[in-house]
């Protein structure tokens, strides 16, 4: 069965729905994302905990087979990145209120435990820096990015209640104290969640070649440089996923970060909530069985105020 684990997650995302025989809608506020699924395959399992599930056909309690590497369970990776994307889009509605900073190491630092301990200490120093200078307090969303050579980077979004204060990149590097930092603008990015999470899965072709990554789909994407100017580069889709250690948490956030609001509703109600917001992203997945028969179709649509359309199918 193709995408079997993915189907399980779709089922758990639709409480109150008896099975795939019905239609369901999910809408996330701030950036409006509509997730539509329709199919005929029944739900055959129910998760009990992180390690066990019940087979609804037989009543047996069985154990999940956990993979040794995140790349071996693409549904898990997809869910983690989707959660992060939703979290970013639920909070990043005014790009001028956000400061995007990447923290790097001078040496080839490969210890993921040290990574988050270094972050904890940096965050304490950064809060003190803001307080001493009378600057507004910030919340944060951070995500770890493994490099082909084994080192770690941290992507940080600092969320301010008003326009983000100007802090020179050299000051942030001094507070960080472990290596270089980059501060970039998110002006003009219509889907920041999708844009930023791409860094965690895709890998630039030059980095992939130097790291010995040879397989994967090569695509040309548009990003921004340090001055916010658009630039094109070649990437290998999903090449970074196998670098994450098993059980590693891709992202973290502070307590004040709001969670996206999710509604189970109809298509008509979803469109009423979206209003006149333009469609800026669309993706459709067809799920088939071993015989090639379609058993489910899943459609994602995102609507963003002031955005420009882009579509992927």
Image (cartoon, grey):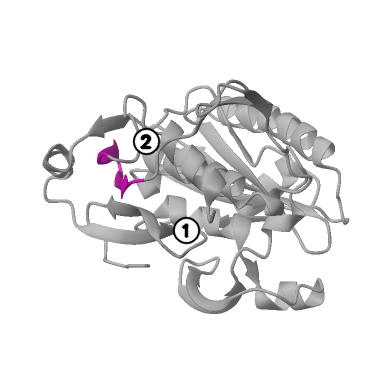
Mark 1, mark 2: which one is toward the viewer?
A: 1
| Region in magenta | 22-40
Using the image, determine if residue 37 lies above or below residue 219: above
Residue 176: image x %, image y %?
73, 42
Q: Is residue 31 magenta?
A: yes
Calculate the distance from the C-alpha at mark 1 to the C-alpha at mark 2: 23 Å
Which numbered tag is attached to residue 162? Answer: 2
Tag 2 or tag 1, which sits nearer the N-term?
A: 2
Q: Main secondary structure of the magenta part?
A: strand
Q: Residue at x 75, y 30 (%)?
A: 121
Using the image, determine if residue 47 lies above or below residue 5: above
Which numbered tag is attached to residue 195? Answer: 1
| 313 on left or right of 275 | right
Q: Residue at x 31, y 29 (%)?
A: 17
| 53 on left or right of 173 | left
Q: Residue at x 47, y 44 (%)?
A: 7
């Amino acid at each position: 069965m193709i995408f079997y684990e993915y189907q399980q997650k779709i089922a758990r995302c639709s409480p109150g729905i008896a099975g795939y025989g019905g239609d369901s809608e999910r809408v996330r506020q701030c950036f409006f994302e509509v997730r539509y699924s329709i199919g005929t395959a029944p739900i055959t399992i129910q998760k009990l905990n992180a390690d066990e599930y019940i087979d609804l056909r037989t009543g047996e309690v069985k154990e999940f087979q956990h993979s040794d590497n995140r790349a071996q369970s693409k549904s898990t990776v997809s869910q983690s990145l989707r959660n992060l994307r939703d979290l970013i889009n639920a909070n990043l509605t005014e790009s001028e209120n956000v400061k995007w900073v990447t923290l790097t190491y001078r040496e080839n630092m490969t210890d993921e435990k040290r990574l988050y301990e270094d972050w904890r200490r940096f965050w304490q120093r950064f809060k003190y820096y803001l307080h001493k200078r009378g600057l507004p307090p910030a919340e944060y969303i951070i995500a770890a990015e493994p490099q082909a050579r084994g080192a770690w980077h941290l992507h940080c979004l600092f969320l301010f209640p008003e326009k983000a204060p100007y802090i020179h990149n050299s000051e942030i590097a001094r507070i960080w104290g472990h290596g270089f930092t980059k501060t970039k603008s998110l002006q003009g990015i219509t889907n920041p969640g999708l844009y930023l999470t791409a860094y965690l899965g895709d890998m630039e072709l030059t980095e992939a070649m130097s790291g010995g990554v040879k397989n994967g789909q090569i695509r040309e994407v548009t990003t921004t440089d340090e001055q916010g100017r658009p630039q094109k580069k070649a990437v290998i889709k999903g090449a970074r996923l196998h670098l994450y250690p098993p059980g590693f948490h891709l992202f973290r956030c502070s307590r004040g970060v709001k969670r996206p609001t999710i509604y189970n509703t109809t298509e008509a109600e979803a469109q009423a909530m979206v209003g006149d917001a333009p469609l800026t992203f669309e993706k459709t997945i067809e799920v088939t069985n071993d015989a090639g028969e379609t058993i489910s179709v899943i459609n994602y649509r995102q609507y963003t105020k002031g955005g420009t359309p882009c579509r992927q199918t």
